[in-house]
Image: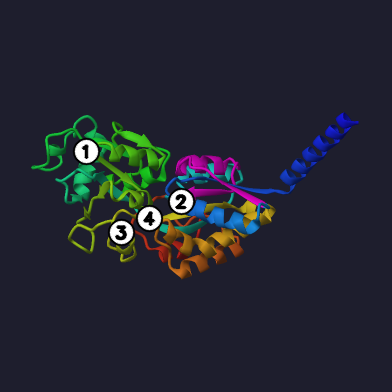
Amino acid sequence: MRKLLSILVLLFLLMSCAKRQESEKLIKIDGSSTLFPVTEAVAEEFQKQKQGKIRVTVGISGTGGGFKKFIRGEIDIANASRPILKEEMEQARANGIEYIELPVAFDALTVVVNKENNWVDYLTVEELKKVWEPEAQEKITKWSQIRPGFPDEKIVLFGAGADSGTFDYFTDAIVGKPKASRGDYTASEDDNVLVQGIEGNKYSLGYIPFAYYAPHSDRMKAVPIKWDKNKVKEPVVPSLENVLAGIYNPLSRPLFIYVSKKSLEEKPEVREFVEFYLKMAATLAKEVKYLPLPEKAYEMGLQRVARMQTGTGFGGIPEVGLGIEEILNRPPKS
């Protein structure tokens, strides 16, 4: 009798677990590690309100990695720190994947050095290009080659991996062509790896999203950037205020989520999450040190979702230095 009772209890537990798993709805998100803190904050708040009825998973395989999964139909939403590229658009079209492009926040892509670095007061875009362009590989290896007066010590470089949208944006903004970069540096799609490397070497130089710099500002230094094309001629420090003022160029950038049209149509929980994201992004972005968009931009995003307005305002070609309303006002192209 006791054995029978144990079997019945076990069957009841298994049935309860299966029923719970069946009733639990799942939203899958992957992509940019830059946008991860914002999306993770939104997901946590959303799940609290849903009290376990909806689960949201957020991966960090990099913007390129996220798009690969997205255009295979493996995830509902792709986090992206750059717009979708032409080849990704073509693959999505071939796979029958339609998407809605939604800007959700701004980032100040930040050039950083070790806290013990006492010689860099600013860097120009030209100096950064000199360091990071493909031709610099195994040639520009010492600080003294960047500027006279810098120490004759080896530069220890850290930067985004090739699957990262940060890599695409930085190379476009600094070198002038996406993905054009020297290869002899420590690369990772995980920004925490880069943070640890920069903190650990006096002669380090790297670039990371502002939200990964801000919590470590007592252990590393953000480098002011001088750009001849900027409306401000003196070097500008990376800050959310300077991004909003339009003077931290060319390293200010919008961040996006790309939502599967199919998921919006077939999974009500995805639509609910996206609408929640657009309504909460301004508050939660600030909490994780990102700059929220103007309120009008989120309203336009909600309208885009309501109309199922698919496509991208970039047409598969990356651009730098664009205002958010200009992006949203462009007619999307699939």
Q: Residue at x 20, y 41 (%)?
A: 130
Q: Residue at x 72, y 44 (%)?
A: 21
Q: Residue at x 39, y 61 (%)?
A: 291
How far is disc 4 from disc 2 in space, using C-alphas?
12 Å
Report the residue marked by disc 2. Answer: 37
Q: Position of residue 33 (x, y in %)?
A: 44, 45
Q: Are marks 2 and 3 in contact (CB under 8 Å)?
A: no
Given residues 108 and 332, the one toward you in this image is 108
Is residue 100 visible in the rendered image? The answer is: no
Label 2: few (<14), some or many (≥20) within 10 Å?
many
Q: Residue at x 53, y 56 (%)?
A: 42
Report the residue marked by disc 4. Answer: 107
In the rendered structure, the answer to whether residue 18 lies left or right of residue 210 reads: right
Q: Amino acid at mark 2?
A: Pro
Q: Which residues are magenta?
A: 54-80
The residue furthest bottom is: 296
Query: Which dot marks residue 239?
Result: 3
Q: Position of residue 153 (x, y in %)?
A: 15, 34
Of the 4 image quadrants, the one containing the N terminus is top right
Q: Amino acid at mark 3?
A: Ser
Q: Position of residue 211 (x, y in %)?
A: 38, 52
Earlier-in-chain disc, 1 versus 4:
4
Foreground mark, 4 or 2, reads 2
Given residues 90 and 242, the one toward you in this image is 242
Q: For numbered disc 4, what is the local secondary structure?
A: strand
Report the residue marked by disc 1. Answer: 202
Query: Which dot marks residue 302?
Result: none
Q: Amino acid at mark 1?
A: Lys
Earlier-in-chain disc, 2 versus 3:
2
In the rendered structure, the answer to whether residue 139 lies left or right of residue 16 reads: left
The residue furthest right is: 1
